[in-house]
Image (cartoon, rainbow, N blue to C red):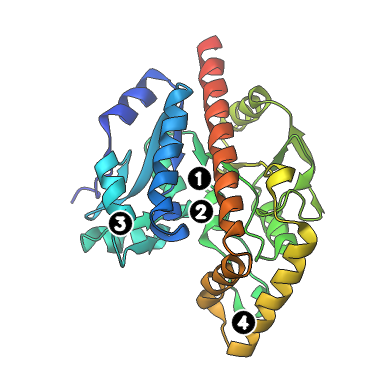
Amino acid sequence: MTGLPIRISDEVTQAVADGRPVVALESTIFTHGLPRPRNLAVALEAEERLRAAGVVPATIGVYAGAPTVGLATEQIKELSESDHLDKASLRDLPVVAALGRHGGTTVAATAFLAHRAGIRVFSTGGLGGVHFGAAETFDESADLTTLAATPVTVVSAGVKSILDIRATLERFETLNIPVIGYRTRKYPGFYITDSGHEINFKVDTPEEAARVIAARDGLELPQAVLIANPVDPAKQLPPEELDELLNRAWAEAERRGITGNASTPFLLDFIQRDTQGRSLDVNVEVYRGNVRLGGEIATALAALRDEA
């Protein structure tokens, strides 16, 4: 029996073969993360901005059971308008595929599929990580263990603010996943530029990032490289407002008895409603910045390959 095929668009296949810059994009931002019709607009804008910079976009998702790298525009539109899609992490891929379902791929699944397609750079909004109380619940994202065994480069604005950032950074260290700030040693907290945690290394240019990635590949190390790219300080949520908001959100979740997997969507929805949609605006700005930087790093990687 042969393995389940991954559909890779002709455009992406040719770009990877030619050594041209390609950036992977996840689909959960438009299947689960943003409301309609903004979700579709953001998804298509990301692709358009990459193309304008000379970079091939590869939006990844599961379409009618087929894990697909390089979704067509019509497929993106259909997924963005569909109800009851699966949120497919890596463990879910074989199930969603075998049942012929549509699915938006998480960071873990997107990173895996991007690597299988030969794509070296992946831009997303925020990463999953360790949840508060994980010492008792063991609740941590599959992003962590997947990225420990998947040699892609992930550009994000850190992990989501509702997570235990300190514990997540400790897990990254344990899993040998390098975390590198882009022009900062202050680890961002998705909605804010500074989570209050320091990291050891930073790079100041896409070219420096490309050299780090090339060194990882030269050493044949199996883990991802994480580039932490903070949102523009002028566009972040005020940090003091976020702290107070998170305290109220957690208190309300506890009052309602909301725990486990239900916590994340509840907390994110609470933040969105309480900020009257301003958190969504920050989310979009985060994503735009990471897509732009991902394109610049992919371009620098392609240039480094040409020099070699």
Q: Which of 56 and 266 is in front in this view?
A: 266
* Measured Cα–Cα span from mark 2 to mark 4: 29 Å
Q: Which dot, 4 or 3, sits closer to the camera?
A: 3
Question: Is disc 2 placed on a helix, strand or loop?
Answer: helix
Q: Position of residue 206 (x, y in %)?
A: 64, 26
Q: What residue type is labelled 2?
A: Thr
Q: Which dot, 3 or 2, sits closer to the camera?
A: 3
Residue receiving disc 2: 146
Q: Where is residue 63 in the image (x, y as percent from the top left)?
A: 26, 51
Residue receiving disc 4: 253
Task: Name which of mark 2 and mark 4 comes first in the sequence.
Answer: 2
Q: How crowded is mark 3: few (under 14 residues within 10 Å), some or many (20 or more)?
A: some
Q: Which amino acid does label 4 sit on?
A: Ala
Is 200 positioned to the left or the right of 160 in the image? Answer: right
Task: Name which of mark 1 and mark 3 comes first in the sequence.
Answer: 3
Q: Which amino acid does label 1 sit on?
A: Thr
Q: Which amino acid does label 3 sit on?
A: Glu
Q: Are marks 1 and 3 in contact (CB under 8 Å)?
A: no
| Residue at 42% in and 52% down | 39
* Measured Cα–Cα span from mark 2 to mark 1: 6 Å
Q: Which dot, 1 or 3, sits closer to the camera?
A: 3
